[in-house]
Amino acid sequence: MFPNKIDSAYIERTIKRICQGDILRDVSIIDWNYEKEIIELDLPYIIVMTQDCDLERDFYNRSQINPKTHDKFLQNILVSPAYDAMKFRDGHHLKKFELTMENWNSDNYKRIKDQNNARFHFLESCLELQVPELVIDFKHYYTIPRETLYKMYADHYLATINQLFRECLSQRFASYLSRIGLPVLEKRTDSKSTLPTASTS
């Protein structure tokens, strides 16, 4: 049973710990490339993707005075950037990073909005909480050090995806990351067995 009445896709929480489904706005994260160059990425929105049970246990374990063990501690928190839906539709959401992305016609964009494209997750807007329509690309995710995210949390927290909607996002994300690319098999001329050809991605 869920403790909250589910009457909205979003809630505004007052508890102090980070939760799965939290939306943060205007976040800068540090990235680097193989040449060891430090790159600062300014992301308009991020969604916390780490499982909530792990976030809760980390928070309460760290809140204890002299805990017996520290095995519940998290070192990093998994987040996904969320893109403005209209910029995403036009393929302009990563323009500032000099990346050209696909634009989506009406039919294909509708499939994304209806959650019928496994790679993407669509989030409805909520004007009351200043949440615009957003799209998450499951191929894009980062980790942020736990202490760093907590330090920026109060200044950047916007809203939280409500429980049932959060679980839907989590399951779709896990399903996409666990997909398996199977080889295309061709039958041998003797019909006794099959041989693999090229692998799918």
Image (tube, rainbow, N blue to C red):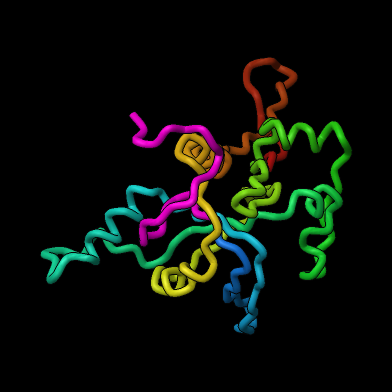
Q: Residue at x 84, y 60 (%)?
A: 100
Q: Residue furthest top?
A: 191
Query: Looking at the picture, how far across and down is residue 58, in whole percent?
Result: 29, 59
Numbered-mark total: 0
Comparing 133 with 127, the one in front is 127
Query: What secondary structure do most residues of the magenta stretch adopt?
Result: loop
Q: Residue at x 84, y 53 (%)?
A: 91
Image check: 78 left or right of 71?
Answer: right
Query: Looking at the picture, how far across and down is residue 154, in whole percent?
Result: 46, 68
Up the image or down, 101 lies above or below 149; here it is above
- 9 drawn magenta: yes
Q: Residue at x 73, y 37 (%)?
A: 112
Question: What is the span of residues highlighted in magenta in the rendered image?
Answer: 1-23
Q: Quadrant of the N terminus?
A: top left
Q: Quadrant of residue 187?
A: top right
Query: Looking at the picture, how far across and down is residue 139, in whole percent?
Result: 64, 51
Q: Quadrant of the C terminus?
A: top right
Comparing 72 with 11, the one in front is 11
Q: Residue at x 39, y 73 (%)?
A: 147
